[in-house]
Amino acid sequence: MSFADKPRALTDLTTYLLSQTAKLAKRDLDQRLSERGLRLRHMAVLAAVAEGPASQLDLARRLDMDPSDMTATVDDLEGSRLVSRTVDSSDRRRKLVTLTRPGRTELRRLDALAREVAGALLAPVPAARRQQLHDDLYRVLVAHDHRDG
Amino acid sequence: MSFADKPRALTDLTTYLLSQTAKLAKRDLDQRLSERGLRLRHMAVLAAVAEGPASQLDLARRLDMDPSDMTATVDDLEGSRLVSRTVDSSDRRRKLVTLTRPGRTELRRLDALAREVAGALLAPVPAARRQQLHDDLYRVLVAHDHRDG
DNA sequence: ACTTTCCTTTGGTAGTTACCAACTATTGGT
DNA sequence: ACCAATAGTTGGTAACTACCAAAGGAAAGT
């Protein structure tokens, strides 16, 4: 059961450590989010629209989601009044998704919650290196993005 | 599309970066493994039995898998002759899973493949910090294990 | 001997994720 | 006016993950 007796052939692989750590992080965060009836994708959309209203396709592209999944996610958020949908008057095909006041409040709550989870998870890493860890992951993602879009 | 225009509210969260990075790593690795008709769990089992024969329940516990899923995984591996099953003579309920010679060869191949994927993914991180990244993740997992493992 | 526990196997299930096709309404180009 | 492309929606699907229950054979405890 203890992580220490997992096969070296696995624990020597950074990819394996990454996937295991991410699994823990996701599990912890999902559990906290589900207390509020939400999932990570809901939080992602709230975070995106916090930067300003956007069309659903815009959001889908920015968050790497399928447009149809975006519809469902926005349905949920609209259902609990965290965002509102309004037809874009300059292009009536588009629906602008806007963060409501309760939505902003909720996002703040979710953000605090996520930081709490991250803090607990990364507690064993010295503070200085936690920032480095963050930067390194960011670097990896940016670089990967430049490769294939 | 570019990672850089993802919402700051997300990219500031280390948990989000972790999950995104892990998703990439998993996708890349899975794709390479599927060329060989295998998945991560198969590699995990091969890696575990490389340290010596073990019963299926043992393996399931060490790899955090359900025993029934272990049965299916060992079925696959046995089907392609990468492991063999033998009844434990000292406890005939148990079936000892043993790495075959082709299994050992395959594991070496998979290991090289995984390192290749990790190398490509983590290329943007300076070598010295790559080791730190590895150590920090390891630390997180060990600590988490002591909590509730 | 009897009961309980253990190991494996079979055959499920629920919930995700990540898609895709098709349809409607709308727009922009010509 | 017509056509191609775009935005959103609906209603799927396939593949996986992570379970769970039950049952048969074997072992251990009393």
Image (spheres, coloured by chain):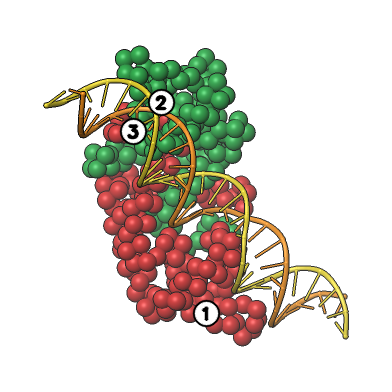
Chain colours: A red, B green, C orange, D yellow
Res. B112 visible in picture? no
In this rendering, would B22 be left or right of A27?
right
Res. A45 visible in picture? yes
Numbered disc 3: secondary structure? helix
In this rendering, would B65 be left or right of D27?
right
Q: Where residue A10 sits in the image (x, y, percent)?
A: 42, 30
Residue A114, quarter of picture: bottom left
Q: Residues at badges 1 and 3 in contact (C-beta under 8 Å)? A: no
Q: Residue under label 3, please give it.
A: B61
How many tags in the picture?
Answer: 3
User: What amino acid type is highlighted by mark number 3?
Assistant: Arg
Q: Where residue B80 sits in the image (x, y, percent)?
A: 57, 24
User: What amino acid type is highlighted by mark number 1?
Assistant: Arg
Residue B37, quarter of picture: top right
Q: Residue under label 2, please give it.
A: B48
Q: Is residue A108 above or below residue A21?
A: below
Which residue is depicted at the point 53% across and 61% down? Answer: A63
Numbered disc 2: secondary structure? helix
Q: Nearer the viewer, mark 2 or mark 1?
A: 2
Q: Are marks 3 and 2 on the same chain?
A: yes
Q: Chain of mark 3?
A: B
Distance in Å between CA atoms under marks 3 and 2: 11 Å
Which residue is depicted at the point 35% across and 14% down? Answer: B89
Q: Chain of mark 1?
A: A
Which residue is depicted at the point 43% across and 42% down? Answer: A19
Distance in Å between CA atoms under marks 1 and 3: 48 Å
User: What amino acid type is highlighted by mark number 2?
Assistant: Ala
Q: Is residue A59 above or below residue D17?
A: below
Q: Are marks 2 and 1 on the same chain?
A: no
In this rendering, would A143 be left or right of D27?
right
Q: Is residue B97 above or below residue A132?
A: above
